[in-house]
Image (cartoon, rainbow, N blue to C red):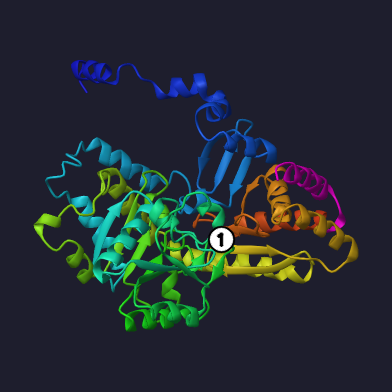
Amino acid sequence: MTTAESASESSRTGGFDLGALLAERGAERYELHTRYLNHQLPRMLHTLGFDKVYERAEGAHFWDADGNDYLDMLAGFGVMGLGRHHPVVRKALHDVLDASLADLTRFDCQPLPGLLAEKLLAHSPHLDRVFFGNSGTEAVEGALKFARYVTGRPRVLYCEHAFHGLTTGSLSVNGESGFRDGFAPLLPDTAVPLGDLDALERELRKGDVAALIVEPIQGKGVHEAPPGYLRAAQELLHRHKALLIADEVQTGLGRTGDFYAYQHEEGVEPDLVCVAKALSGGYVPVGATLGKDWIFRKVYSSMDRVLVHSASFGANAQAMAAGLAVLSVMEDEQIVANVRATGELLRTRLAALTGKYELLADVRGRGLMIGIEFGRPRSLKLRGRWAVLQAARKGLFAQMVVVPLLQRHRILTQVSGDHMEVIKLIPPLIIGEREVDRFVGAFTAVMDDAHDGGLVWDFGRTLVKQAVAHR
């Protein structure tokens, strides 16, 4: 860059210096959130002792200012499939910025969206076309719109305890009342139990159902669709001229040990598939609605309807470059094979602990999407403590495990859902035996403490007081 070009660039940036801004104001992070954003978030983090200050991150780890490393078993709710700052994704983003592309003109066809669609559809052999948006909930919204339009029917069925997003359409097929309360009226959609084919058929007989949307493995509680359910549901839906929508926003892109979770069941070919999260590489939000050719042709039936469903930032160059890099890494580094091997190791070692700890009820899941469920113990002493927690608020014991995992062992996890005694593990897909050893060792130490009546229960008493105070 010449001196003149450098001066011109400096004038365009107006002297903005991101590094200097963060150095000057970074310590105010919690105060800024309290004042200007969701004020309950910092309150919750302070209460649980999760108010850490992470200085940097790479792969499956964070580091604080003292150089302590933290193991990430949450992956940003599944967004960080390749971990943080994967060098291939970083380079792709630097390259696309440096290319100074004529992006989002709206009146041309850039190559990157077509190339990403081609690569994504190569993993989805029964699907033909893609719509790119900006998030998982947007991918779901697109699928709901498409299904309603092409069938001419108003109602979409969803499963109890499902989570498909929080915008109005996706909220209408959200199976958790805590998210829906206060936002009515929503769309006229109907919940059916996951795995209940009779309930599905009863609704289909009414003749107004456009589709069933289903997570092959539900994020809330990590509940897998029973063997054979997806294929049987697909047959019922098609018999009644309705569609199957697979929400793979969290389960897709290798999370469960196949590219999509529905691929674990032979013969399942959803009409529409929603993906997002890991496709972003953790950098640029992206969502995708994949579908069969006839669906897209019916929605976009003429030039008059060319923009009948669109997104202002959809298919932007940065998101497309990130997605292409992610899929390339998945192939080059054999990510799906690693998920199968590492997931089996982690699940097997955790499942072996169910016989040792009476508070540990179940370990389930596929690949690197694992649910650890706690339940009512047998011994009188532990049963009394368990009852106190349950009376205050269901889900407190799981929180009692999550907190010392972070505070004592520097491992970040999450409770799988409100009022659930389940911890969900969705770590970056790149973890291996070393991370499995670290997590299992830490989890064993916390469970030992819980069964011995140690510090875990002291924290539990604090949680009980807070739960009662905020009723």
Q: Main secondary structure of the magenta part?
A: helix
Quadrant housing the N terminus: top left
Furthest-left residue in this view? 303
Residue drawn at the location 25% of the way across and 65% of the way down: 149
Please tell me whether mark 1 sits on a helix, a strand or a loop: loop
Q: Please, is residue 60 above or below residue 332 in the view?
A: above
- Camera-nearest residue between 218 and 141: 141
Quadrant housing the C terminus: top right
Q: Please, is residue 194 above or below residue 382 in the view?
A: below
Q: Position of residue 159 (x, y in %)?
A: 49, 68
Q: Amino acid at mark 1?
A: Lys
- The region drawn magenta spans 451-471
Does residue 362 appear left or right of residue 37 in this picture?
A: right
User: Does residue 148 show up magenta in the picture?
Assistant: no
User: Does residue 455 show up magenta in the picture?
Assistant: yes
Label 1 CA crowd tier, 10 Å (few <14, some 14–19, many 20+): many
Does residue 226 appear left or right of residue 99 in this picture?
A: right
Does residue 317 appear left or right of residue 21 in this picture?
A: left
Residue drawn at the location 60% of the way across and 30% of the way down: 65
Q: Is residue 194 visible?
A: yes
Residue drawn at the location 38% of the way across and 82% of the way down: 236
Furthest-right residue in this view? 381
Residue drawn at the location 67% of the way across and 64% of the way down: 373
Q: Position of residue 453 (x, y in %)?
A: 86, 53
Q: Quadrant of residue 186?
A: bottom left
Q: Is residue 426 visible?
A: no
Q: Which residue is mark 1?
A: 220
Q: Position of residue 460 (x, y in %)?
A: 78, 48
Q: Please, is residue 253 above or below residue 194 in the view?
A: above
Does residue 90 appear left or right of residue 194 in this picture?
A: left
